[in-house]
Image (cartoon, grey):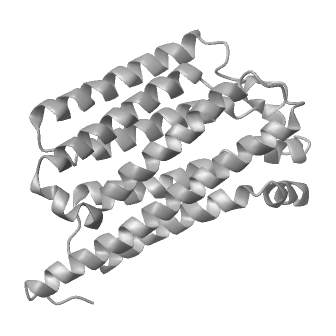
Amino acid sequence: MENYLAFIFDNKIYVTYLMEFIAALAGSLFLYKSVSVRKDVLIFVRFLWSVLIIDILGGYAALAYFDNYEHFVFLKDTVFVRNEWYYNIAEVYFICVYTYLLREQLSGKKPRNVLKWCIYGYIIFSVLNMFRSENFFNGDMMFNDIVGTFIILLAVFLYFYEMMISDKVLSFYRKLFFYVAVSISISYLVRVPISIYGAYVTEKNTEFLELFYDLIRYSNVYMYSFFAIGFYIYYRNSKKNRLALGVRTT
């Protein structure tokens, strides 16, 4: 356990856990302080907690390794000894939820249907690709990541397009999902290209691996910080609106 904790701190993995916790906590505080909560916001907060739990559980591979598989004998010499399969599945979940949440911000029937079928199609494509790919257990599913990134960017584009042609543009900075859309689009644009390049780099290239993990960590810090800021600004705006309507707040 000591070696595992040293690994977590030496590689600054705890930074991602901390930022995920801060974002989820900010969302929970928003729920606690709010008089009424929209369904999509509630789903988003629960999703953030699930991301934290998924990431923590994903550390099983490192924990088993540093434990010399004494308590994880069932993993030794199996395809599950590495956690790539775990995160390949998790990434599909993340992309689908982000797309769903942005879809919920749209009022137009056509763009909502487009994103709905994108989600269904992406799930089918990803599952089939996992079954046929040789990298499912020992590497990133690049095609899943690429297609998922395009879907994320499409959802973000539709969200901003609808905002620009409506009166929502007058108060865009007060909306929680504005911060979600901005942060996830930039995060995926940073992470996916370098992940694709990283697939062709050997583990001996320590300089690239260090750069890769630094970029992933910084993108996570940026994204989850934006989530927390979004909750704060959204709460302040909601509170002002309630005060203007004469609704008592805490």
Q: Which quadrant holds residue 77?
A: top right
Query: Which percent across, then down, holds residue 148?
Result: 44, 29
The total of numbered circles placed on residues is: 0
Q: Residue at x 27, y 90 (%)?
A: 250
Looking at the image, can residue 57 be seen?
no
* Of 185 and 83, the residue lying toward us: 185
Residue for point 70% across, 35% down: 83
Q: Is residue 58 left or right of residue 156?
A: right
Instruction: Tell me residue 198's x, y (percent).
Output: 71, 29
Vertical arrangement, residue 10 with respect to residue 192, above or below = below
Can you say which quadrant of the picture contains the N terminus?
Answer: bottom right
Q: Position of residue 78 (x, y in %)?
A: 78, 24
- Residue 72 vs 131, above or below: the answer is below
Answer left or right for 24 relative to 101: right
Q: Quadrant of residue 18?
A: bottom right
Q: Nearer the viewer, residue 193 or 102?
A: 193
Q: 136 or 158, which is in the foreground? A: 158
Quarter-of-image position of residue 122: top left
Provide residue 56's location: percent of width, then percent of height.
Answer: 65, 53
Q: Please say if 98 is above or below 92.
A: below
Say which residue appears at 61% left-offset and 36% top-offset: 87
Farthest residue, direction top: 132
Nearest the viewer among 182 and 42 is 182
